[in-house]
Image (cartoon, coloured by chain):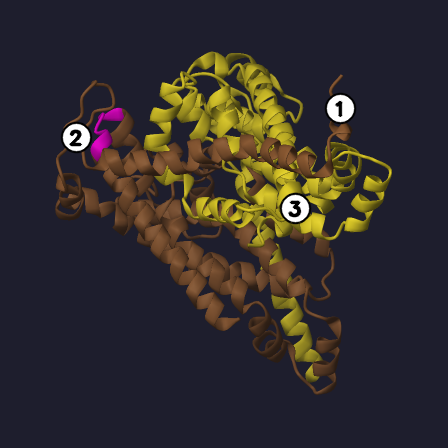
Amino acid sequence: MFKLSDMSYKNQRILIILLFSLVPIVLLFTFAYLPVIKMFQYSFTNWNGLSKTMEYVGFDNYKTIFTKPEYFAVFKVSLYYFFATFVQMGLALYFATILSFNVRMKNLFKGILFFPTLLNGVAIGFIFLFFFKPDGTLDTILQMIGLESLQQKWLLNPKLINISLAGASLWRYMGMNFIIFLGAISSIGKDIYEASDIDGANRWHQFRHIILPSIRRILQLNLILAVSGAIGVFEIPYVMTGGSNGSGTFVIQTVDLAFKYSKLGLASAMAVVLLGIVLIVTVLQRVLIKEEA
Amino acid sequence: MHNVKYTAASVFKYLTLILGALAALVPIVVVLFASLKTNTEYASTGPLTLPENWLNFSNYTKAFVDGKMLLGFKNTLIILVISIVGATLTGSMMAYILSRFKFRGSALLMGAFLVATLIPGVTTQVATFQIINSLELFNTRWAPILMYLGTDIIAVYIFMQFLDSISESLDESAMLDGASYWTIYWRIILPLLKPAIVTVIIVKGVNIYNDFYTPFLYMPKSDLQVISTALFKFKGPYGSQWEVICAAIMIAIIPTLVIFTSLQKYIYNGFSQGSVK
């Protein structure tokens, strides 16, 4: 019988390197690189995804995206999510900071604040449909605290819809930022706080001069990731509104174009634009963070 | 004076914490309330009203049976187990050769994985769809399984980080005993990677359980529905029966809640390790 240990270590090494990397390499190529190549190729065609032939149309698809307002509008929707990320990170940072110090029932609060992040995206979509619907949770709470005048059609009013949806998204992802900040803050040595206590520093000084500088890199990383996050929004608006009333995001539009309207070429061009933005942001992030370090 | 300021700050601190906790919990708790109400009770009471009978599980039965949630759980479990076992094996194998052997092309390989992380999955779905289609995997469980396996670099990172802390003298002494590289990987490295494996299982498990995009796009067939897509189906026919939808939401959430409360410590670690770039 063939036994691996009968081979010389040199040959074993070659064999094991080949065997162990074969599956990952095949998967990597098939599902990471090949799609990118194909996507570029499709983006210059008018392919509908079904027909045997595709016609090359040059930069027509790109022209359509950048000149027709209905395609470009999705970027405006991203702005709502982008701004929500700032609020989200502010809250996450606040809670992470106070829960890094002595607080009663610390672990309970940590658990509760983090829990939403673990939930199923579809479930969250439904939870917030229930939350925002007429006479739903939000309206009832407003009534309870005497603010009936603020009751709204949260998901039907085109002016409010994206704010409502971005709010749901904030609720979903705040815990993620929170836990990352918490980890970063907990890696700061206790002695630094003690030393600053002796120097008479208060909590604000400690936050400003100890915590903030030590988590600066993580903060920057998160801020820049917020851009790609804001463009990649899909589940919450898709489950809640299907992209109606001006709540369609970049990804919803790409999916609709490709699979509902069979405009695969155009959808690919949108995806290329999206990929371009994300890559620029990522490169920017690497450069900025490298300069810091 | 000093004391007064301290108390005011502390009141503010607890007030914000309670508000934060309420904001996190209320949207879920009202769903729980609604899920336990009868149809007429639901129609006549507000979302914040407590259910009359805390043991009225009829909506749950209805959601579970009509929504074929059992099928959803079964499919989710199959995909979850195969993907996680596969990702753990391929990820740790990759990490093993990358961290233990210096060979020509190892830097290139690492670079190829790194660059792939820069490509956001959502951007390439249209083209990926065509690939899945041409492999005749559309509407099979293999479509999501291969995708969960194929793009995972986080696992390789976590494993490599861990492998660095496992002394190479361990490998060397096993080699003196004549162990093959396979034996070293299978008998020594893999068991020692257990904490990293737990981390990978948690991070991947949460992602797979909660993913909607992939199964929705690649397995529309109703026999193959997972929890996410099963839940999404309530949107149409049950549009007005919120008490049933709410029960379905709770059914999807309960496993997360149970696992979270029992594995809290590992989950925190898993997420802070998994997210470090």
Magenta run includes residue A239: no
Q: Do the dots labelled 3 and 2 sit on one chain? A: no
Give me the chain that's brown: A
Of the two numbered discs 3 and 2 in the rendering, the one whose residue sits closer to the viewer: 3
Give me the chain that's yellow: B
Q: Work out whether A169 lies above or below A221.
A: above
In the rendered structure, the answer to whether residue A42 lies left or right of residue B170 reads left
Question: What is the secondary structure assignment of the residue under circle 2?
Answer: loop
> Separation of disc 3 and disc 2 at Cα?
47 Å
Boundaries of the magenta span:
A260-265
Identify the disc placed on residue A46.
2
Q: Identify the amino acid type marked 2.
A: Asn
Identify the disc placed on residue A27.
none
User: Which residue is located at x 44 percent, y 35 percent?
Assistant: A29
Question: Quick one: quadrant of the C terminus of chain B?
Answer: bottom right
Chain ID at mark 1: A
User: Which residue is located at x 16 percent, y 48 percent?
Assistant: A66
Does any portion of residue A159 appear in the rendered image? no
Decide: few, some or many residues near mark 1? Use Cα within 10 Å; few <14, some 14-19, many ≥20.
few
In the picture of the structure, the residue carrying the numbered disc 1 is: A3
Does any portion of residue B190 appear in the rendered image? yes
In the picture of the structure, the residue carrying the numbered disc 3 is: B101
In the rendered structure, the answer to whether residue A75 lies left or right of residue A206 reads left
Question: What is the secondary structure assignment of the residue under circle 1?
Answer: loop
Where is residue B35? Give x, y as percent.
Answer: 56, 27
Chain ID at mark 3: B
